[in-house]
Amino acid sequence: MGTANPEITYNSKIEGDIVVTRVDAAINWVRNNSMWPMPMGLACCAIELMASAASRFDIARFGAEVMRFSPRQADCMIVAGTVTYKMAPVVRRIYDQMATPKWVIAMGACASSGGMYRSYATLQGVDRIVPVDVYISGCPPRPEALLDALVKLQEKVKGERSSSKLLSA
Amino acid sequence: MTIDVEITTAVSQQFPSATPRASLDCPAFNVPAAEALAVLQHLRDAQGYDFLMDLTAIDWSAEKSPRFTVVWHLYSSTKHTYVRLAADCASDSEPVMPSATGLWAGADWHERETYDMLGIKFTGHPDLRRILMWDAYPYFPLRKDFPLAGLPTELSDPDITEETKTGVIAAPMAGGPFVATPGEPMSDAEPRAKDEAWNERNEKPN
């Protein structure tokens, strides 16, 4: 583990019974550590997604074990698999139904670019219909790669100006 | 695989219009479209071919006539043998074929798939909708004149089209399709682009 983040660490010698932080840091800390995924499992990547949730890889270590099959309760859509043109409007509608703030991970070659499916039936990258935060390479990616993407997404969220976004929304 | 040697004579005696079809495996027949159902029913009820293995069609390309041939594969669960039946569609522009759903309920989805991919209408089918592509899709993708990359069209949902400003595009083939070439050594047989003169960055030369 790295050194403690001085922005959010409580130092009792200095602060007594008061914790001082920035609103952004506090909000992002909360969002980071309970990022509930929406498992958009569409092909074989979904098998690796399931493996990353199981005991060996245990995505719970990063606070993202609560797979929500309702978009209303999810924060991060993990598009795991080939998105066909028939499925594409459905994926976008589910994304629209998620409450903000929301993020998207494109898991694997197909979700990122259409992968090997250069054909009439396959959407050539899910970023054509939803904004993607993190892309994962691999066909399918290993669970470690998904965990790495989650950590990268958490790093990204740490830098967001959440309070001003909340106030302007 | 055991082969039912008597079936050829049995069928041609019953149906003089059924002619033997070139085949490398099981016995096969060409029949006129109008007689296809009668032959199928005879095979099912009198010859023991009780199981419809597969139902599909062939597009011989836009230049050929007859252009479309519907193919049925039957299996006998008592004799453990196969038989194949083929019938040409009379029309090349509006191909039709009688539906086998009255004989095998399982023909339902096979015929929907054949309609979806090749545009053959099965008369008498109870619910002939597309099964793989969405209902409003304007093309029949397995026809020979349809490019593998696809043709641009709208997504199935107008709301989403308006929101994302995107639709179906022709997939970037970038020198593909990427297929293996038979031959030795294995390193030469690896799947690779057939035309590497162009890719995503360099335009295809005319």
Image (cartoon, rainbow, N blue to C red):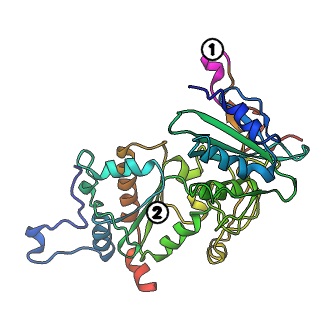
Q: Which residue lies under the disc numbered 2?
A: A104
Position above or below: A23 against A35? below
User: Along the horizontal axis of the image, is B71 left or right of B204?
Assistant: left
User: Along the horizontal axis of the image, is B153 left or right of B126?
Assistant: right
The local crowd at label 1, few if under 14, some if 14 to 19, many if 20 or more residues have their Cα within 10 Å, is: few
Position above or below: A82 against B188? below
Towards the viewer: B151 or B67: B67
Residue A113's disc number:
none
Residue B21 falls in image quadrant: top right
Task: Name the quarter where the C terminus of chain B is drawn.
Answer: top right
Q: Amino acid at mark 2?
A: Val
Towards the viewer: B49 or A157: B49
Q: Are marks 1 and 2 on the same chain?
A: no
Q: Which residue lies under the disc numbered 1?
A: B185
**Which chain letter goes with mark 1?**
B
Q: Residue at x 43, y 44 (%)?
A: A141
Q: Amino acid at mark 1?
A: Pro
User: Along the horizontal axis of the image, is B176 left or right of A114?
Assistant: right
First to last magenta residue range: B183-191
Does the magenta-highlighted stretch encompass residue A50? Answer: no
Q: Residue at x 57, y 60 (%)?
A: A127
Question: In 3D space, how far apart are the residues under numbered discs 1 and 2 (Cα atoms)?
Answer: 43 Å
Q: Residue at x 66, y 29 (%)?
A: B6
- Residue A54 in view here: yes
Q: Residue at x 25, y 51 (%)?
A: A58
Q: Nearer the viewer, mark 1 or mark 2?
A: 1
Residue at the top extreme of this rendering: B185
Residue A115 percent across, percent down from the top left: 58, 46
Residue A43 percent across, percent down from the top left: 48, 51
Towards the viewer: A18 or B169: B169
Does the magenta-highlighted stretch encompass residue B189? Answer: yes
Residue B31 percent across, percent down from the top left: 79, 43
